[in-house]
Image: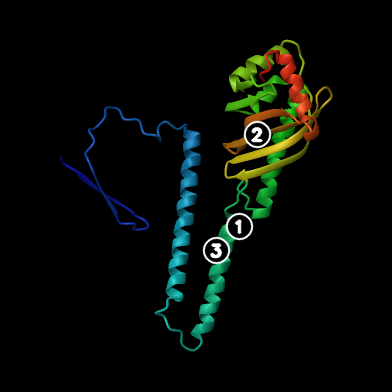
Amino acid sequence: MQTRTWLCGAVFGCGLVMAVPPVAPMSGPVTSEEMIEPSVRSEVEHSRALIVDDLLRQKRELEETIHLFSRDHQPEGDETEARKAALEAAKARLERMRRERFRTNDGRIIDEKEHAELLERQANEVMDTFHTAASKADFDAYFALMHEDGTFLGTDATERWTKAQFMDYARRFMVEQGKGWTYHPRDRHVSFSGDVAWFDELIDNEKYGTLRGQGVLRRVDGAWKIAQYSYSFTVPNDRAAGVVALILAQDGDGTP
């Protein structure tokens, strides 16, 4: 069987050689790039270019640092001070790179603290708008904030809905009857990792008292979408046994 030899590491020279069988040509091949919408593809290509540029800069700086501070390189005279100055300059450049990796949608560079504050403001705005839209029975605004693959978990064990299922359920109230549901959020906590965030909050309702809301946000094309939201009743520990007994009694057969 014939094989082709591929060499990995055109930029960094990893030297990994792989032998792979030849692949028969396909008629009308469709690459992953061609499957991406032009506007999205442009954004992807721009992101790739930034990543490559960043990696190349880091590589050059590492090479410079290794050269200047190699054990085989013995400083003489004023060279010691030059090495110290070069080290400080390298540290400053690396710190600048670390800060500049945070950019807003309009291209403005912000530092790490500002970036964290921006993310938190964006997430809070999405969640607050989500609750406001529910209270106003604004069907379109409410579901525009949910991710297409999102899920909603109600307080009942049977209430696990995909976005489409939840839309069918909510349409009867929001659209046909003009009725929504009002929960007042407070004590919200949000954590981030890349394009994913997770949160928990307390939400107050006139009928049900204080509940806990929690879920996940995903950032899509720069906008945060609710990928999951879950309601749960908060039960004081010293009253939990009584609540469970009440539920079991209502079930009749003694099973939850």
> SS class of the residue under badge 2?
strand
Residue extending furthest right? Answer: 206
Looking at the image, can residue 137 be seen? no
Q: Which residue is mark 3?
A: 94
Q: What's under tag 3, amino acid-wise? A: Leu
Q: Is 238 left or right of 153, judged from the image as shown?
A: right
Q: What amino acid type is highlighted by mark number 2?
A: Gly
Q: Position of residue 255 (x, y in %)?
A: 66, 18
Q: Residue furthest top?
A: 176
- Marks 2, 1: nearer the viewer: 2
Q: Are marks 2 and 1 in contact (CB under 8 Å)?
A: no
Judge whether 41 appears above or below 10 on screen: above
- The residue positioned 72% from the left and 19% from the top of the image is 248
* Amino acid type assigned to the residue bearing label 1 in the image: Arg
Q: Residue at x 46, y 56 (%)?
A: 55
In three-dimensional space, the C-alpha distance between marks 2 and 3, rounded to whole angstroms, equals 36 Å
Helix, strand or loop at mark 3: helix
User: Which is more N-terminal, label 1 or label 2?
Assistant: 1
- Gap in Å between the C-alphas at discs 2 and 1? 29 Å
Structural crowding at the residue carrying mark 1, measured as other residues with C-alpha within 10 Å and reported as few (<14), some (14–19) or many (≥20):
some
Which type of secondary structure does the marked residue at label 1 adopt? helix
Quarter of the image for the N terminus: give it. Answer: top left
Residue bearing mark 1: 99
Q: Which residue is mark 2?
A: 215
